[in-house]
Amino acid sequence: MGAKVGIIMGSQSDWPTMKEASAILDELGVSYEARIVSAHRTPDRLWSYGKTAVERGLQVIIAGAGGAAHLPGMMASKTRVPVIGVPIQTKALSGVDSLYSIVQMPRGFPVATMAIGAAGAANAGLLAAGILAMTDPALAARLDAWREALSASIPDEPQDD
Ligand code: RP5
């Protein structure tokens, strides 16, 4: 069976961040694919990825991009598959540029925008899993267990170093 989640990113340089999403999907047993698809450098690839997303069985797309981060919004314009945007942290503007480029979508073409950087990428994986878990009871049980384990790992009291 094909991938249920498409992880796409504008550049190879985004992969260290976007790996956080793939690690979560690995932990939860969700099938995914990872591709470099740039709104600016490979627009034809973006177009064909968006046009074929539904027929290929993708159910969620996680799109990470930095700077003038048009990839998530452009992908949302090409497919009704829900798009989760991850603003990549940048050197020049710390990722605020990425965040603003992704979050302010016009009415009609939503992108679910995460936090800047690694936490955002991990949360994108968790959000994708949560969406898929609505129709997958086994995944729902794994996600519940993951959340319980995280809660259990938090101590009641702070410790001295
Ligand atoms: C964006 O430009 C990419 O998403 C990346 O975050 C940023 C820089 O890309 P590189 O110059 O590192 O390839 O399109």
Image (tube, rainbow, N blue to C red):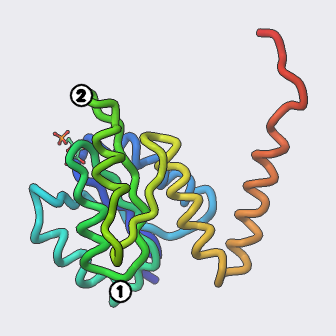
Give the image quadrant in which the ligand numbered 1 is located.
top left
Q: Quadrant of residue 53?
A: bottom left
At x 40% / y 52%, what residue is drawn? 86
Residue 92: mark: 2
Picture coordinates of residue 110 (x, y %)?
39, 70
In the image, residue 34 above or below residue 139: above
Which sits earlier in the primary sequence, circle 1 or circle 2?
1
Picture coordinates of residue 78 (x, y %)?
25, 78
Relative side of 114 to 13, left or right: right
At x 45% / y 70%, what residue is drawn? 5
Residue closest to the far front: 107
At x 81% / y 36%, what residue is drawn? 154
* SS state under label 1: loop
Residue closest to the far bottom: 55
* SS state under label 2: loop
| Amino acid at circle 1 | Val
Q: Mark 1 — residue?
A: 54
